[in-house]
Amino acid sequence: MRAEGNTTRRGALRWLAIGGAALALCTAAPSVDAQGAPAISVTFAQIAGGPGTPSVPPQYPELATPPFNTYPNYTVVSTKTLTLPLTVTMTEKLLSGDTFEATLVAVPAGKVDIVVKDAKGAVLSKGRYTIPPKTAKPSTIYPISVPYKVGNLVVAITR
């Protein structure tokens, strides 16, 4: 009787392990865009920093640390969800008048080439960034900060 119980338990554990592996594979799969191409969805936020009473949005605690703490007050002024398809450059206009270009170059790693240009088209910043998964700490990247009004405009990207 005992041998039979161990066999049943082993069988259940085996199926549990197989089910867990299948679930991990399903959740690790990249998302796809409307045409079925590999893509990732990100939150693209523009955050204005300047003088005033110290205040940092709770979802962006890194803004209270160097180099961002040059300005004590930050306010989220724009948030947008973007789907970044593999190898397609997405362009967004920043509130500062500059342009932000993002191109997904690796799925599911979330590697993105980012280029920021001024109003005349001159490159202000460019680089390759890995956007960490939501479960990572920190989970947000801040690829650029540009002059804006009496302070700066920080771009934040989160999956």
Image (cartoon, helix red, strand yellow):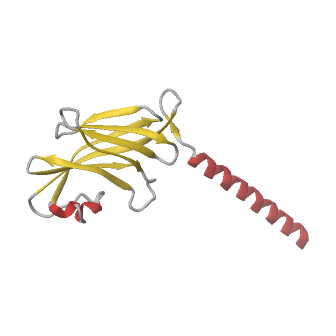
Residue 153 x/y as whole percent: 19, 48
Name the residue at 27% across, 49% down.
144
Residue 21 visible in the current orientation: yes
Measured as percent of width and height from the top left, residue 66 is found at 24, 65
Quadrant position of residue 49: bottom left
Q: Quadrant of residue 51?
A: bottom left
Q: Is residue 139 above or below residue 104?
A: below
- Residue 20 position, x and y percent, is 66, 55
Residue most extreme to the front? 122
Quadrant containing the N terminus in the rendered view: bottom right
Q: Nearer the viewer, residue 60 or 8?
A: 60
Does 64 sit left or right of 127 as displayed? left
Where 75 falls versus 38 (above or below)? below
Residue at position x 18%, y 39% in the image: 95
Is residue 154 visible to us here? no
Q: Is residue 41 left or right of residue 22?
A: left
- What residue is shown at x 75% (from left), y 62% (from top)? 13
Q: Nearer the viewer, residue 107 or 129?
A: 129
Q: Quadrant of residue 16?
A: bottom right
Residue pictured at 43% horizontal, 54% vertical: 134
Q: Residue furthest top?
A: 35
Residue 28 place in picture, x, y as percent:
57, 48
Is 129 placed left or right of 123 in the picture?
right
Image label count = 0
